[in-house]
Image (tube, rainbow, N blue to C red):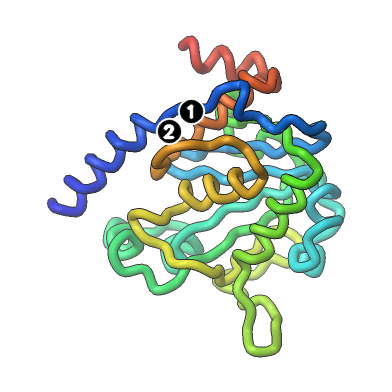
Amino acid sequence: MRLFALLASLVLLAGCAGMPSRADLPKEPTPHTVYVVQYGWHTALLFDGKDILARSPKLAQDFKDHKYMLIGWGDGAYFVEDHPDVSQAVKALVASDYPALQAGGRETNPPLGVAAGDSVPLAITERGFDQLVAYIDRSIAADADGKPIYLGKRLPNLNLFYKATGNYSLLNNCNSWVVGALRAAELPVSGLNLTARSVFDQARHIAELQGTATPALISRQTD
């Protein structure tokens, strides 16, 4: 009960996160696009496949010829399970052993299972994109020989889980990892963002400021 009371308080705080203004946007040209996608309580990032694989040495070793790449981060035990139970979810929040990074090739945008209104396009500068890809590469843990550590089922060139760097917890979850990625990309995400709703609202607001918001995204906001 204490855990869920704390979570409820954090959700309220996340909802109070300040929104950026147009003056906070990068002033340089923004030739790259990354998409924030929401799956219920989880958020992830969708990239143009050629764009990210040309810049990520780690991902390029395992993937090729994908139109898009979907990248997410979460608890190592919970994230790799097809049907995790409640006890695994609670353990992930309070006693996670290690995190995992998921990378998978996708052929559609939005990806299968994501509604058009649940994908936000964000424009990124050249420097911001390089920093974002570096953030992702740093999130992939390596063994003593410098090779990635794979978790769960391995589907080469389709979907992989890597053991990740960092520590997963209630205060450092999949959504706060996405926030770190967007800040690495020099996007003005502000405040405490621990829920998918908070991250998605911030991303949508930035897209509206940039003029990249799609009709489906705007329609979702007015529903």
The answer to whether 122 is drawn above or below residue 102 in the figure is: above
Secondary-structure class at tag 2: helix
Asked where in the image residue 89 lies, by quadrant, the reply is: bottom left
The answer to whether one can see residue 116 in this image is: no
Numbered label attached to residue 107: none
Q: Nearer the viewer, residue 24 or 60?
A: 24
At which x and y percent is residue 69?
72, 49
At which x and y percent is residue 83?
42, 57
Q: Residues within 10 Å of mark 2 (few under 14, many from 20)?
A: some
Mark 1 vs 2: CB contact within 8 A: yes
In this picture, residue 215 sits left or right of residue 20? right
Q: Hey, what amino acid is under mark 2?
A: Arg
The answer to whether 24 is drawn above or below residue 54 in the figure is: above
At which x and y percent is residue 121?
67, 30
- Give the residue drawn at x 43%, y 34%: 198
Asked where in the image residue 144 lies, by quadrant, the reply is: bottom right
- Give the residue drawn at x 64%, y 66%: 138
Q: Nearer the viewer, residue 1 or 84?
A: 1
The answer to whether one can see residue 168 in this image is: yes
- Give the residue drawn at x 14%, y 53%: 2
The answer to whether 34 is drawn above or below residue 153 in the figure is: above
Q: Nearer the viewer, residue 191 or 177?
A: 191
Q: Where does label 1 land, which residue? A: 201
State the separation of the CA atoms marked 1 and 2: 6 Å
Q: Where does label 2 land, which residue? A: 197
Secondary-structure class at tag 1: helix
Q: Residues within 10 Å of mark 1 (few under 14, many from 20)?
A: some
